Amino acid sequence: MIFLRDFLLILKAEIKRDFIFMKRYPLEPISFIFFMYLILLAILFGFHQLAGATSGVINREKMILGYSLMQFVLSTQMGWSGQIQNESQTGTLEQLSISGHTLGEVLLARGFSQLPRQIVSFYLLMIAYTFSLSDLKIDLLNSIPNVILNLLIMAIGIFGLSYIFAGITLIFKRVGFFFQIINFAFLGLFWQDRGSLVEGGVMAFIYDHFPLTMGMASLQNSLNPGSSILEVNSLVFLLHSVIFCIPGYLIFSLMEKKARDGGLLSQY
């Protein structure tokens, strides 16, 4: 009960902190969304020019959904490791590490506090592509409850990745470009055709049990016109995300201990 009360206090502080950041630097999140929007638009335009009459074979809906999900993963991960890097440079990281709360708790509260903004960003991207591209078979209005539920469950699995990224950042400090490569690898995974994978193979197993691809498959079904229920069992999906998050936290704890022992938390 005391832990829950303390965590809610951290969460309240992180929500206030995130609100102040958006109020003080409004162009930062807006320009990020606009930049991400233009990248995929340029890719789709390039495909159209290269493919010509055969451009209809491109699954634009899957490309847009996968790309918007990559943005969701990227913004979540940067909210952890990116801010750790900034706090390491400004000297506030050491203050966080010696506070009454563990660094892992602070990061978890930060993840939950930023979720509403990231869900809104996901929808803004999807809406922008719906208006920009004609004949997209995406039902944004009727799928809102399912999409939000999917993103919330998926976020728990992303937190596991974010813990690992945050731990690597504690030790190596500047790792932005390395994580950019990994995030674009997730984009390739999102765009992967499940039907082309060999049943019973390693890649098929990863695709069916990895929380991010489970979320991608569920969102694809939820956004189809006429879909009214979650196609992937939400309890199974939640279980996979939680199981994926726990090792991430444990790995982060080990890396945090290594950073403390090496005196890396006070280097800036």
Image (spheres, grey):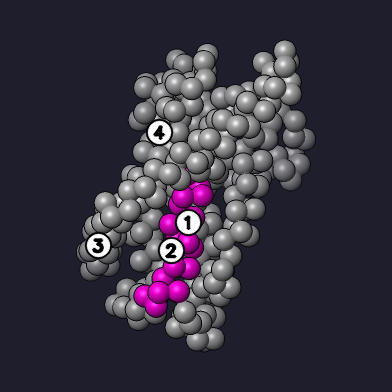
Q: Where does label 2 land, which residue?
A: 83
Q: Where does label 3 land, which residue?
A: 13
The residue carrying pointer 1 sits among few (fewer than 14), some (14 to 19) or many (20 or more) residues within 10 Å by Cα, namely some
The Cα–Cα distance between marks 1 and 2, rounded to whole angstroms, is 7 Å
Of labels 4 and 1, earlier in sequence is 1
Above or below 221: residue 162: below
The residue type indicated by label 3 comes to Ala
Of labels 4 and 3, earlier in sequence is 3
The residue type indicated by label 2 comes to Gln
The Cα–Cα distance between marks 4 and 2, rounded to whole angstroms, is 23 Å
Of labels 2 and 3, earlier in sequence is 3
Of labels 1 and 2, earlier in sequence is 1
Q: Which residues are magenta?
A: 72-93
Above or below 215: residue 174: below
Locate residue 182, reporting x and y percent.
63, 53
The circle on residue 124 is 4
Q: Where does label 1 land, which residue?
A: 78
SS at circle 3:
helix
Nearer-the-camera pick, 204 or 224 = 224
